[in-house]
Amino acid sequence: MMNADQYRESLRDGRRLFVNGERVEDATTHPLFRAAVDSAAGDYDRYFDPAPGAHGPYYEIPETPDELRAQEEVQNTWSFATGSTVHSLLMLMTAGSRMRADLPVYADRILAYYKGAKRRDIRCVQTITDAKGNRALPPGKQDDPDLYLRIVDRRDDGIVITGAKLHISSAAMAHDLIVMPTKRMKAGEEDWAVACAVPVNAPGVTVINTSFAPRPDQDERYYPYSRHNVMTEGFVVFDEVFVPNERVFLAGEVEHSATFAHALGLWERLGSVRHYVELGDTLVGLAQLISEANGTERIPHIRDKIGEMIIYASLIRGCYEAALSSAGRTPEGWISPDELFTNSAKYYAASEFAKMVRNLHDVAGGSVLTSPTLADLENPETGKYLEKYMRTMPGVDAKYRMRLFHAIRDFTADQFGGWQLVTTLQGGGGLYAQQIVARKHYDMDRAKELALYTAGIGELDDVDVPT
């Protein structure tokens, strides 16, 4: 296992990182990357064990529903890079299980890769979304065939790939990029049906980053949440990158081109739902606190909005619990969350999130955006006015109320808030992706039988009707 210092040193490997038009020579010290690196490094020190063969809990494959629950729950304390590693490897193992009957060589390579990643104690991120070009055209009819990542050369010892993958969270903090097709490929699209593992520092890999991290000249107190929860988003370019055979998990077999995306969707969406359980409760808590600070908590429409937010948080939690308690089992004995409840919860949480944020903003009021900073409160020339006019009642002084407004703004209405609004909708695939999987796993036959019985067409004995 690596400790935190060894992890930081492992990132100084010659990787090509850029942000704001400039080359990043050392992600561990750059002001827009440092907090994210420190967060990932904290997981290394937390679990470090020098004993030979030791490994962190993020490399465990759950074999019981309780183990699955424990692994998911502890992820709330991990960095994104660590959590992404869990879902990347579980995705690979799930895909390998589904491919084993048809493509045992790839399944064996995936298992070997998992064991190697565990031994090296590395961090992985998924790279799935292609540039896509003209969305109305398939990969082979684009005016540039590289707009979907593809195989450009096949050699005896491996393949060469070219293309780009977008929206890759924490790519700059990881060691390996897990590449997979963005969608199901058809006959004639074999070159685009490729899955593999690529080191971030491999020749030909470039990561162009963005981040909502507070800039060095900004007062960090104005960003109470996002300063500690920094994310980088990578636009990852693969320019004729060689991948050796042992790291290739699919190379033209279109019949399994969607296997990886479906496996990733399952684990990525479960992780999202687990996060949304906490997110929903946080929104409720912020709304209740600011309503109490404003003296509006008893106003009927405020109570109604917070009540709606409570229902939102509770339904997400209910589906999350159902996804865990109804988990299935792979042929290898691994536990896999229920796909219907996982996708239904992700769809509901994402589709209603913007409305819950709207409720919070309506409850809080315009000071979410216009509240002055704590530095203004500390200035003797302006602080006396803020102390006078930002308080509301005994026990609610200006500082407390301003800090609540700053938290709501930072969490829902600023750089991080905008990032969260989009990623809640798009993370793990857009709404339609969850709807497709939910339809696939929904018991439509039973629903139709109940409908026929209701219409007087079917017999009672034909269907299991609750009494």
Image (tube, rainbow, N blue to C red):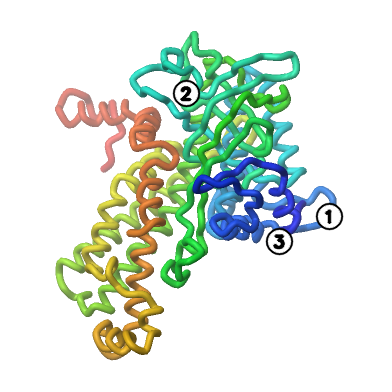
Quarter of the image for residue 387 reads bottom left
* Viewer-nearest residue: 157 or 321: 157
Q: Between marks 3 and 2, how big is the CA–CA gap?
A: 40 Å
Determine whether, in the image, residue 96 is placed left or right of residue 129.
Answer: right
**Mark 1 lies on residue:** 51
**Mark 3 lies on residue:** 45
- Counting other residues with Cα less than 10 Å from the Cα at mark 2, is it few (<14), some (14-19), or many (20 or more)? some
Q: Give coordinates of residue 444: x percent, y percent.
A: 31, 28
Q: Between marks 3 and 1, how big is the CA–CA gap?
A: 14 Å
Q: Secondary structure at mark 1?
A: loop
* Viewer-nearest residue: 454 or 310: 310
* Viewer-nearest residue: 453 or 220: 220
- Counting other residues with Cα less than 10 Å from the Cα at mark 1, is it few (<14), some (14-19), or many (20 or more)? few
The amino acid at mark 2 is Leu
Image quadrant in which the C terminus is located? top left
Does any portion of residue 78 appear in the rendered image?
Answer: no
Q: Earlier in the sequence, mark 3 or mark 1?
A: 3
Q: Give coordinates of residue 15: x percent, y percent.
A: 66, 41
Q: Secondary structure at mark 3?
A: helix
Q: Give coordinates of residue 334: x percent, y percent.
A: 61, 38
View extreme (right): residue: 52
The amino acid at mark 3 is Asp
Q: Nearer the viewer, mark 3 or mark 1?
A: 3
The numbered mark at residue 132 is none
Q: Earlier in the sequence, mark 3 or mark 2?
A: 3
The amino acid at mark 1 is Ala
Q: Secondary structure at mark 2?
A: helix
